[in-house]
Amino acid sequence: MNNIVTEKKSSYSLYEELINQRDRYKKDAFQYERGYVREFGELILAVFNKKIECIEKKKIIDFCQKAINRDEPIDQNKLNAYIKEEMAEFTEKLHHMEEDYREAKSGGVISDKDYLEVKRIYHRIVKKIHPDINPEVAENEDLMDLWNRVVVAYNCNDLQALQELEFLVAQALKDTDIEDVEIEIPNIEEKIKALEEEIEHIVSTVPYIYKFLLEDEDAISDKKLELSYELKEYEKYCEELDKVLEAFVISGVTMLWPMN
């Protein structure tokens, strides 16, 4: 009987440890992604801007060529509507990329001491109200709200917010019986296996593996050269597309311009 109890405690401890590991790796991955964007974001945006400029010009050329093939004038209103619709997805993606870059650039960097304290507080809160460790929490709206705020503060390295939230969590738990409930995790071995697989996936894929790039000065230089070369290639291609567009005008294509 004692062996069974020991095994249950061992599985629970491993489960709790793996949840902390998973969350830590996810946080690290988030930080590496921010670091990657801070390091390369300006060049990545320049490349993508030039890329969508090329795509837009190609679509204009395609629209014009089809009108010429039908022996029709090129209607500027229809062209503008076509381009707006075709480029909407690219424009939205560019907007999100610009927002990510601004957030990454403005995100503060905390000291190692504060970073360790962030992790310590988070670990203490996890033991109390992580919904995966304590399923009873999911039934309590106030605690779930606190937990969601904890996750945001943890990901943002907001030490002050975490300190305040730890106090609020303690106060909220006083008003419930959740802390005293004997926790049972159904199918715990399966969940342990799933967590191990999730952790393996996190540490072997982007954005976590940006870590190795960001720790290598030579690799950073090579990546910037690669992006600069890509930008020049798109600039050259854009010039070629401009010549094609100029050819339409030279050939005497009729354009229907809207009247203001």
Image (tube, helix red, strand yellow):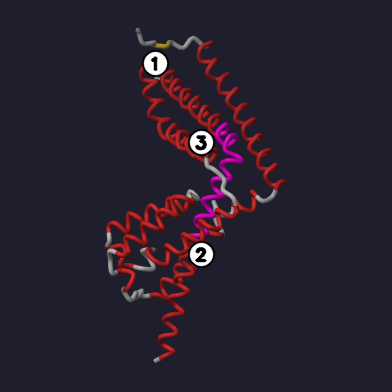
Residue at image mark 2: 21
Residue type at mark 1 is Gln
- Span of residues in magenta: 24-47
Residue 231 % position (x, y): 62, 32
Which of pointers 2 and 3 lies earlier in the amino acid sequence? 2
Image quarter (top left, top right, bottom left or bottom right) of the C terminus: top left
Q: Quadrant of residue 51?
A: top right
**Residue 33 counted in the magenta span:** yes
Image quarter (top left, top right, bottom left or bottom right) of the N terminus: bottom left
Which of pointers 1 and 3 lies earlier in the amino acid sequence? 1
Residue at image mark 1: 76
Residue at image mark 3: 102
Residue type at mark 2 is Gln
Q: Secondary structure at mark 3?
A: helix
Residue at x 54% of width, y 45% of height:
34
Residue furthest right in the image: 218
